Amino acid sequence: MVKDLFLKENILNILDYLDEGIQIIDNRGKIIYYNKAAQKLDDIDREKAIGRHILEIYPSLSYETSTLLRVIQTGEPIFNQEQIFINYKGDKIATVNSTLPIKAKGKVVGALEISKDITQVKELSERIVDLQKKLFKNNKNKTPVKNRNAKYTFVDIIGEGEQMLRLKSLALKAAETCSPVFIYGETGTGKELFVQSIHNASSRRNKPFIAQNCAALPSNLLEAILFGTVKGSFTGAENRTGLFELANGGTLFLDEINSMPLELQAKLLRVLQDGRIRRVGSTRTVDVDVRIIAAANVHPQEALRTKQIRKDLFYRLNVVSLQIPTLKERKVDIPILTEHFIDKYNEVLGKSVKGVSNKVIDVFYNYTWPGNVRELEHVIEGILNLYDIDIIELEHLPYQFNDFVLKQKSRQPLRPLKETLAEVEKNIILDALNETNWNITKAADLIDIPRQTLQYKIKKYKLKK
C-alpha cells in the first residue's frame, strides 16, 4: 500500500499542486521534468522544453551561472541562491533557488531545483529604491524630505490615557539622541507612528527616513536591498545603491526585524558596530551614518527564546526600548480614537456622522480588538462607506461584533435599587414559606427574622398560599 503511494505517477501529480517551481535535469543537462508552477514561472511549454538542454531554453545562463549545472558538476547542494535569467522568449525572471543533486550508487545522475518567483517583488523593491534615490539626490538646498517619507509627528498620536502620555514623553526624549531604538507592539498598535515621530523630532529630521519590512522579502533579496549590489555579484546583478547608503545621515526603520534571517542579522550587527557597509559581491566598504530604529510584533523575550532575534543584535538595538500597548490595554482612549476616525473619514468620504451611540461605545469597551487601533480605524471607515447616518448604532457594526451586540441587546435595563431589593426580598420570603408549607414560625426561623416581621412582609407583598 505504501509502495503504491510512492509510484512515479502519484509523485508527479503531487508536484503539480505545489506553488514553487520544480525542475529536474539529468547529468547531461537535459530537462526531464517541469511541474505546472515551473512552466508558469518560466512561461514555457513543458512539452517543448523536456528533452532539450537547459542552456538552450535559458540562453542567458552558462555552465558557471546555472545553479542546476553547478550542482551536477560539484555534487553539492545550493540553498536559497538568487538567480536572474532571461528565458528564450526574452523575459527577465528573478528566482530564489534551492538545488539538490540526485544520486544513485554514489554518482550524480541529475539535479532537482525548487524555485520561488521573486520577479515582481524584486522589480517593485528596486523601483522603490530608485525613486528614493532620486528623491534624496541633491536635496541639500531643497524642501526637507521629511514631509514625503515621514509624515507623522507626535501630534498625530492620539491618546490621553496615562500609558500613552508617558510613552510619548519617553519617545520624545529618545528623539534627542542618535542611539538605536527597539519598539515592540502587536500589529496595528501604531509602531510606525512613533518611529516617524521620533525621526521628525530628531536632529535628522531633514535627512532621509527609509522604512523596510523585513518580512516582505526573501533573505537574498533583502540583503541586496539593504546593502546594495555590484555588477556580477550574482547572475544578472547590477551596480545598485542599498538602503543603508540612501539613508546616510538619516534614519532606517527595520520593521518586523524578528523575521530577518539570523545570518543577515549578523551582518546588520557588524554595521551597527563598525558604521560601515559592504555591497553584495564587493570588497570595498562604505562608511554610513544611519540611525537604526527596529520594531518587532512579538515580545522580545519570546523572540529571543525562539531564536527569532540574535541576543547580541537585540542588546545592541535595545538601547532605547519602547513598548506600545494594545488597544484593549488602553480602553480609556477608545472614545477619543473613535471621534478622531469619524472626523477623518467624514472629510475623506464627504459624510457627516456625528458620533456613536452609548450602546456602541459599550460594545467597543467590551470587544477585545485583536487588530488594535488599526482595526478600530477600519471599522469606522467601513461603516462610513456603507451608511448615510447621523449616529452609528449597533445594527451598523460589522459581523465580528455580533456576539457583543446580542449580549448588549439581551441585557435587562437597570431598575432602581429599592425596587430590585424588594423583588429579591419577596422571592426569598416566598421560597421560605413554600419550603415550610407556609408555617410562619418555621419560615421566620429559616430566614432568621422575627415572626412579626415576616407577617408584616407577607401582607406588604400580598403573598398568598
Image (cartoon, grey):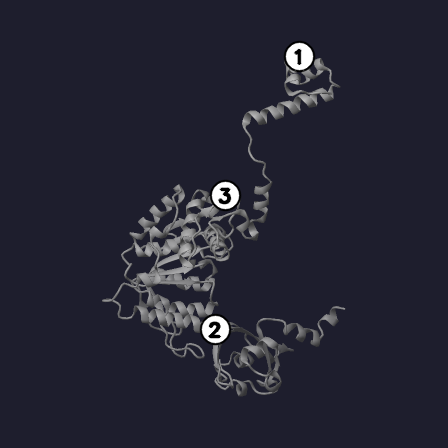
Of pointers 3 and 2, the one earlier in the residue sequence: 2
At x 32%, y 71%, the residue is 134
Up/down of 85 relative to 146, above or below: below
Q: Are marks 1 and 3 in contact (CB under 8 Å)?
A: no
Of pointers 1 and 3, the one earlier in the residue sequence: 3
Is residue 314 visible in the rendered image? The answer is: no
Up/down of 338 relative to 417, above or below: below
- Where is residue 420? Give x, y as percent: 58, 27
Of pointers 2 and 1, the one earlier in the residue sequence: 2
- Where is residue 4? Give x, y as percent: 74, 72
Q: Nearer the viewer, residue 37 or 98?
A: 37
Residue type at mark 3: give it. Answer: Tyr
Q: Which mark is residue 365?
A: 3
Residue type at mark 1: give it. Answer: Arg
Q: Residue at label 2?
A: 120
Residue type at mark 2: give it. Answer: Gln
Query: Disc 1 to disc 3, how far (Cα)?
Result: 48 Å
